Amino acid sequence: MELSQLRYTIAIAETGNFTRASERCHVTQPSLSQQILNLEREIGHKLFHRLGRKAVLTEAGITFVERARRILFEVENAAKELSDHPSLDRRIVVGGLPTIMPYLLTPLIARCRTEFPNLLIHAREDFRPDLVRAVIEGELDLAVVTLPVKDHRISIEPLLTEPLLLVVGKKHPFASRSEISVTDIAEETFVTMGDSSTLAAQIRAFFGELHFELKISHRCAQVATLKSFVAMGAGISILPNVARLPRDNETLTYLRLTGASPTRELAVIRHLQRYQSRGAEQFLALLREHARAQSNEPAVPVPAAR
């Protein structure tokens, strides 16, 4: 039995198809099929029902895949532990949401390049469901996401709770206001992140609870694009405090909503059974330090009324 056969079996189980599994594993479909046949002969059980183009796990296959995942995790953890020596280069892969990666994680990665020159960090920016899946499948050492996350295989470490702020362009009438309430923005047009964004979903839920239907003019994949639309007066928006940059003061104004306090909670997620290398712990230490500093920041200033 070979480790590659275990990986092939898991890929078929997850994709439900031999062809898609071969593409994921970067092998030809005939080669993958032959390896699965060899494995089935060796263990004396069929692992899959071949239903046309669809592959469905047999009862034996369900048991085998569960064990195969444990074996691959243990092998990977053993390799990491053996290579985790202070005199050796270390490599970790971290993930973050598009509303977190450029504002929270990128500065920390830059800091690590100076403080831990032997630590090689690869970053992956993605949406929450994909980051959770990547942590579960062992592709990421850790990821920073918004809660809630529910999976019994995941370790969740809350980092900080941050306010969601109203953001308007400098020429918008709200920019000179001292207070903004939900009723004040009832007729405003909004610029939001796309439907795949957890921030967009949270904002919809927040206003939905207040029986408030957003009028959306633009949907963006990146926060920088959203800020550009708001700055030009194409609408107003809601952004997390972490996305507020010093240079924004030239074109944008951030305000708290009175009578409502939308927030989001950031957390580090890791696989419960994944070995945490020294490099991952070093990065986590900086991340926790940064989160504590963010939590102790003074409240967002509100512009004085004119």
Image (cartoon, rainbow, N blue to C red):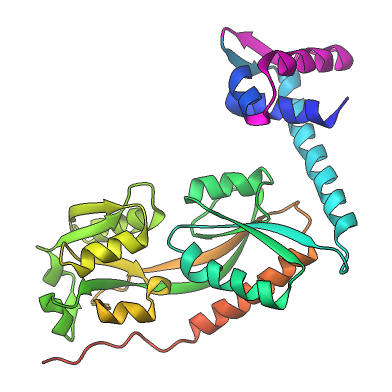
For this view, does 266 lie left or right of residue 276? left
Q: Measured along the vertical axis of the image, is residue 292 above or below residue 14?
A: below
Q: Measured along the vertical axis of the image, is residue 290 above or below residue 275?
A: below
Q: Position of residue 72 (x, y in %)?
A: 79, 39
Q: Position of residue 66 (x, y in %)?
A: 74, 33
Residue found at x 50% / y 46%: 129
Return the residue found at the far top: 52
Residue found at x 61% / y 80%: 289
Q: Measured along the vertical axis of the image, is residue 296 above or below residue 126?
A: below
Q: Is there any visible trace of residue 87 in the rendered image? A: yes
Quadrant housing the C terminus: bottom left
Residue found at x 12% / y 64%: 186
Q: Is there any visible trace of residue 152 in the rendered image? A: no
For this view, does 37 lie left or right of residue 215? right
Q: Measured along the vertical axis of the image, is residue 185 above or below residue 304?
A: above
Q: Is residue 30 magenta?
A: yes
Q: Position of residue 105 (x, y in %)?
A: 55, 67
Residue found at x 86% / y 49%: 79
For this view, does 261 lie left or right of residue 65? left
Residue range in magenta is: 24-52
Res 46 quadrant in image? top right
Q: Is residue 36 magenta?
A: yes
